Amino acid sequence: MPVFGTLVVVGPGLIGSSVLRRAKARGDLAQRLIAVDSSEQVCARVRELGIADEATTDITTAVAQADCVMLCVPVGAMGAVAATVVPAMKSGAVLTDVGSTKVSVIEAITPSLRADIAYVPAHPMAGTEFSGPDAGLANLFEDRWCLLTPLACTTAQSLHDIRSLWERCGARLREMTPSHHDRVCAIVSHLPHLLAFTICGTADHLAAETRSEVLDFAASGFRDFTRIAASDPIMWRDIFLANKTALLEMLGRFMEDAKAMGRAIEEDDTAYIVSRIEEGRAIRKSLQENRQA
């Protein structure tokens, strides 16, 4: 049986359109799929792709039909969108989101919540550097983690239903508090993106002749950074600012570790250099064993 009667995805970008594709492919996430976007051009593309039963810019009419509304908008827009969505939702429906930060998103959505609407914050930790409805993949969440941060207003049934939805998307689930989620994501997701944007900026600011050689002779390490740095700038601006405290803490730790590595290189401290490289290799091996690489 489908988890929901009608699932409304607000923001059919990479994550939202991947959920829609998975729902279409399986048929047991929802009986009816509605995509909502403020852009008629995006809605038209969703219709062309055939990944939803309906695509509309009329958000209030769409969510009034929903048994579950999934907010797939940038974290900086969550509060404003929720303020429009929640008053129009029918009693007993479930609200969820896919925001990459949880404390800020929950704080933004909470003022709009109603006692008869269950809210289940979630974060599927999957993605690519691409965006928009064409970027979605039906298998994007396969064997990836989806982190859930249930609240006091999260009913047992709503949590069960959202767990079922993400399990049917192929995800592995873990529950944690919102603050713990933000500290974890600061180191495993947000800091790597910050470093990628920064190192690409450093390369771009080099003298013209050196910059051309960087681009001509980029090895796999630099190419990996540029792949991450191709991600949506507005989305990542919002994430950095929304998770400022945890991100700055992790950035501070990284800078101290980078300085220590610099001192080791300057002082020919081979033991320290090798130990850090071995730590990196061990982490990579653990990711592979955990099917996350």
Image: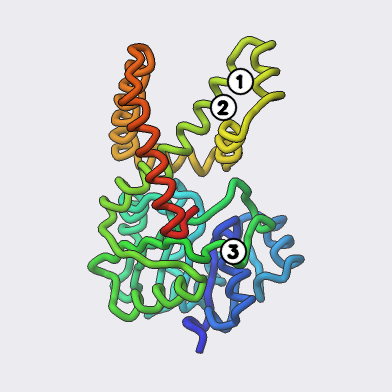
Answer with the quarter of the image where residue 281 lies: top left
Label of residue 18 in the image:
3
Q: Between residues 256 and 48, which one lies in front from this camera angle?
A: 256
Q: Which residue is mark 2?
A: 200
Residue at 31% of width from left, 62% of height from top?
149
| Vertical order, 280 against 110 (above or below) | above
Q: Earlier in the sequence, mark 1 or mark 3?
A: 3
Left or right? Give the position of 75 relative to 178: right
Residue 8, image x and y in percent? 54, 71
Disc 1 vs disc 2: Cβ atoms closer than 8 Å?
yes
Instruction: Please give left or right for residue 227 compared with residue 100 in the image.
Output: right
Amino acid bearing label 2: Cys
Q: Earlier in the sequence, mark 2 or mark 3?
A: 3
- Which of 188 and 35 lies nearest the eye of the viewer? 188
Look at the numbered disc 3 and give the secondary structure of its residue: helix
How far apart, in angstroms, are the residues tagged by discs 1 and 2?
Answer: 6 Å
Q: Position of residue 188 (x, y in %)?
A: 39, 45
Q: Amino acid at mark 1?
A: Asp
At 49% across and 76% down in the image, what residue appears?
Answer: 168
- As drawn, the residue found furthest toward the bottom would be 1
